[in-house]
Amino acid sequence: MSRTHRIGRDVFASLLSHKQRAFLMMLGVAVGVAVLSAVIAIGQGTTARVMELVETHNLDMIMVRAGGDVQVFAPTADRGLSTLFPEDARAIEKEIPNIDIISATQNKRGINLVYEGRSAVTRLFGVEPDWADVRHRTLVAGEFISNADMTSMARVAILGDTVAKALFPEGGAVGRTIRVENEPYVVKGVFTLVGSTTEEDFDDRIVIPYTTSARRLLNRTFLEQIVMRVKDTSLIPETAERVRALLRVRHNMGQGKPDDFFVREPQAVADAAFQTPKMLFSLMAAVSIVALIGGGLVIMNLMLIAVSQRTREIGLRRAIGARATDITQQFLMESLFVALMGGVVGVALGLIVAWGLDAAGLVVSRITWVPFVAAVAACTVVGIAFGVQPARKAAHLDPAASLSGRAA
């Protein structure tokens, strides 16, 4: 039998003869790895969900909102600011070369819809025909607003999925006449399901022609938004700055005077969306590292106690030919094996917790290979780093003193 095989056999024999101690060492690491695995799984799920949110706001779209304060995401209430107008949209379309398509946009919350005995309260958007392409919104049924609808100020509407299901739970919305603020509108189409976040349901809306909203329903011309799709996404920062400069000139904003509008770039959405998750998961990662260090300290202290209790065993092994390096290897292997076993248990517990929280709707998690790799790496580092001192102490015991029952 080779020396390595003998050391491995002695490792397993020692751990099996001291099951309680091995279990306590494993438990300390398992807790840290469980926290780390759950953090990684939830972090990956949250990252994926945030990216979906960012993509919902479109990576090739620049948005101008009325009002000078920073508004990365939609305001929670209507503000009624009259600082943007359709003429601003036309000027941007004409003078900024990187703009592909553009749409002036009005919106208002609290719009009442009725169909027979069913009703809904939703958010209304008055838009131009290119709006759907700018926002990458597709229809599951019917057609979007046309230029003819704009010219005639047609009372037609496109329903979001949430609204369509509220008014037409059995389907068949297209062609039906609903009442919007007590005025008849024909449902021309239904949007494909987009999804929602904790802040907003992107399917809870109704879209009508801008001319209809401006001259029939809302009776005002000012806009809440101007949305535009760019031709070259690499030029978005430059294009956004040119839009800002153009609007400052159009709005007679003198030097030093703050903007009365906000130009939002896709990167601003990504930065804002990731800010809170990054802070949260940095904190949770720090907790998991502390827990792993705690588990390592448990391993080191119990191994040091084990060295004191096994002095005669160590002395006997040295007396029959074991080298100091053999003793070092045995204790390091014991520490590493216990840490890795704790990692296996910890990964299982962490992923179960992440899956359970996801199933309960409290978080979004995604299980991939990353927690397993992270667990192996973390446990290897912990097992070796915190096993070195006990291993060195065991290897440097004086054989004669150990056999007589006295540690050197």
Image (tube, rainbow, N blue to C red):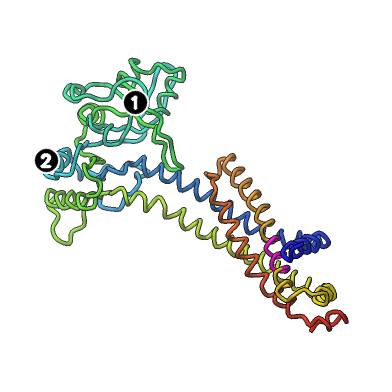
Relative to 237, is 182 above or below? above
Q: Secondary structure at mark 2?
A: helix
| x and y percentages locating residue 142 in the rendered image | 32, 20
Name the main secondary structure of what is drawn in magenta.
Answer: helix
Residue 82, magenta (yes or no): no
User: Is residue 309 among the parts visible in the rendering?
Assistant: no
User: Residue shown at 15%/53% (left/top)?
Assistant: 245
Residue 312 quadrant: bottom right
On the image, the x and y values in percent for residue 52 come to: 41, 42
Residue type at mark 1 is Leu
**In front: 408, or 185?**
408
Distance in Å between CA atoms under marks 2 and 1: 29 Å
Check the image and name the residue furthest to the front. Answer: 1
Which residue position holds label 1? 139
Q: Nearer the viewer, residue 139 or 309?
A: 309
| Image position, residue 366 (x, y; %) | 53, 44
Residue 215 appears left or right of 361: left
Q: On the rendered image, what quadrant is the N terminus found in?
A: bottom right
Residue at x-position 59% and y-position 39%: 359
**Residue 323 is at least partly visible in this image:** yes
Q: Is residue 21 above or below residue 277?
A: below
Q: Earlier in the sequence, mark 2 or mark 1?
A: 2
Q: Residue furthest right?
A: 404
Q: Nearer the viewer, residue 170 or 212?
A: 170
Q: Position of residue 28 (x, y in %)?
A: 69, 61
At mark 1, the secondary structure is strand
Residue range of the region highlighted in magenta in the rendering? 330-338
- Counting every numbered tag in the picture gives 2
- Residue at image mark 2: 94
Q: Residues within 10 Å of mark 2 (few under 14, many from 20)?
A: few
Q: Residue at x 32, y 25 (%)?
A: 158
Query: Which of the labelled discs sits on residue 312, or is there none?
Result: none
